Image (cartoon, grey):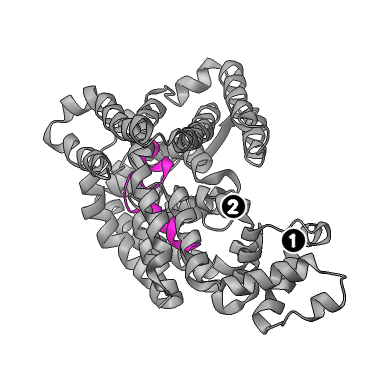
Amino acid sequence: MILPFAALLGTIALAPLAFPHWWHKHYPKVAIGLGLVTLAYYGPVLREYGRILEVAHEYVSFIALIGSLFVVSGGIHIKVKGEATPLANAVFLLVGAVVANFLGTTGASMLLIRPWLRMNKYRITAHHIVFFIFLVSNVGGGLTPIGDPPLFLGYLKGVPFWWVLHHCWPMWLSGVGGLLAIFLALDYRNYWRAPKRVRDTLAGPADQWRFEGLGNLGFLFLILGAVFINEPVFLREAIMVGAALGSYFTTRRSVHEANDFNFEPIREVALLFIGIFATMIPALDYLQTHAGAMGRLTPAFFYWAGGGLSSILDNAPTYLSFLSAIFGSVIDPEIVRRVQALIETAGAGRSAALIQRTPEILNTLQALQTYFGPQMKAHTVSLEQIEIAFLIGNTLFNNYLMAISVGSVFFGAMTYIGNGPNFMVKSIADQAKVHTPTFLGYLVRFALPYLLPVLVLVWWLFFS
């Protein structure tokens, strides 16, 4: 049952090369048709209707988030004039990487891709699109739960909000710094190809920046605030859709026209990801079922395995699957049982005193007291919170959590389907008549020769 997922990936990779006109016309039928094969198996055959509804909810949440951010950011116009030197481009990408941690990789990508295309319009090439995806749509969002969906799911599971920033900033700095260095080398080579007379004519006057549609920032913050709403079901998504509608109908038409705004990019992503979300159910279920039985594994395994699968599966559920694998691989159930007993017998004097307190148990209790104090007082600490406290309280195991956090975010840039914004950026660039690499071209010409060495560097420095 993993075959429909493999078939969809293969079609996405090869069809635009082999028969582009047919693919552009029929890709919705291919994606939905393969998705229906999987759903027919999980529904009438296995009767796993609960699993189908769970994935459907995840898909609705996914589309509500990236769709609303797409609409709202499309109502903000950043007018750029001036010569886009390689240094100016590098600063822009660095700012975009930082902004991604506050607006999310989707929000930052949708807000900044159009001015990025405009400021480089006289010499725009494939590497401008690819490194924007690398830095703004993926690696940049690796410091906060708002930045990328896997980290937000980790936050919901109990990882403290600022824990990733506190522990993963060296990896972020290495990844962003390495990619910017490679980008500067490529962009300088591209920059000097054009004669200065041509650059001056096309670039126009000195740098000028003008912002229109800033009222949409209110809608943007409303969407970001809604991310933290979990109950009741679909309230979060309703707020996001409402913000998108409010933005669309209150934005002046001239702003949308200046941005060449239309719904084709989000339509393409929505249709393709129907098939991706449906067909990847068996792959994720297999991973969830078998990963924990692999024995004691190293952080390097979780970095490469979790990251590698995040490049072809949606990186958010992949993160959760490998988090479960870490729980099963490195956490002793006896320690969890003793911690639970200590919490339940707190204040019971002799009963609690009979429970042996090893250094690992004491460190776990200290982490629970620090990060889950209210739950400790109310005796409502969950099993997952104890397991998270074990990982973050015992520094020996910090690297496991760091490995899947960094791997799931960074490796999302390896393919167009590793993270939601990737396809949207490509689609917007295609709409602007900018040459973008195909699925295989992106992987072979850019991800493997430029991104992979940076990923190896991060592994060698921090997880080897």
Of label 1 and label 2, which has the lower sequence position?
Answer: 2
Q: Position of residue 356 (x, y in %)?
A: 72, 82
Q: Is residue 437 visible?
A: no
In the picture, the disc for residue 372 is 1
Q: Nearer the viewer, residue 251 or 234?
A: 234
Which residue was labeled with disc 2? Answer: 145
Q: Nearer the viewer, residue 420 or 100?
A: 420
In this rendering, is residue 135 above or below 355?
Answer: above
Does dot 1 land on a helix, a strand or a loop? loop
In the picture, the disc for residue 109 is none
Q: Is residue 299 visible?
A: yes
Which quadrant of the view contains residue 179?
bottom left
State the predominant SS element of the stretch in magenta: helix
Q: Nearer the viewer, residue 207 or 101?
A: 101
Point 58% across, 70% down: residue: 333
Q: In what quadrant of the picture does the C terminus appear?
A: bottom left
Q: Position of residue 284 (x, y in %)?
A: 38, 49
407 is within the stretch colored magenta: yes
Q: Which residues are magenta?
A: 404-425
Eye-nearest disc, 1 or 2: 1
Q: CA distance from mark 1 to mark 2?
A: 18 Å
Label 2 CA crowd tier, 10 Å (few <14, some 14–19, many 20+):
many
Q: What's the residue type where badge 1 is placed?
A: Phe
Does dot 2 land on a helix, a strand or a loop? loop
Q: In what quadrant of the picture does the N terminus appear?
A: top left
Question: Is the Cβ of the residue at disc 1 closer than 8 Å to that at disc 2?
Answer: no
Point 74% across, 61% down: residue: 372
40 is within the stretch colored magenta: no
Q: Position of residue 75 (x, y in %)?
A: 54, 26
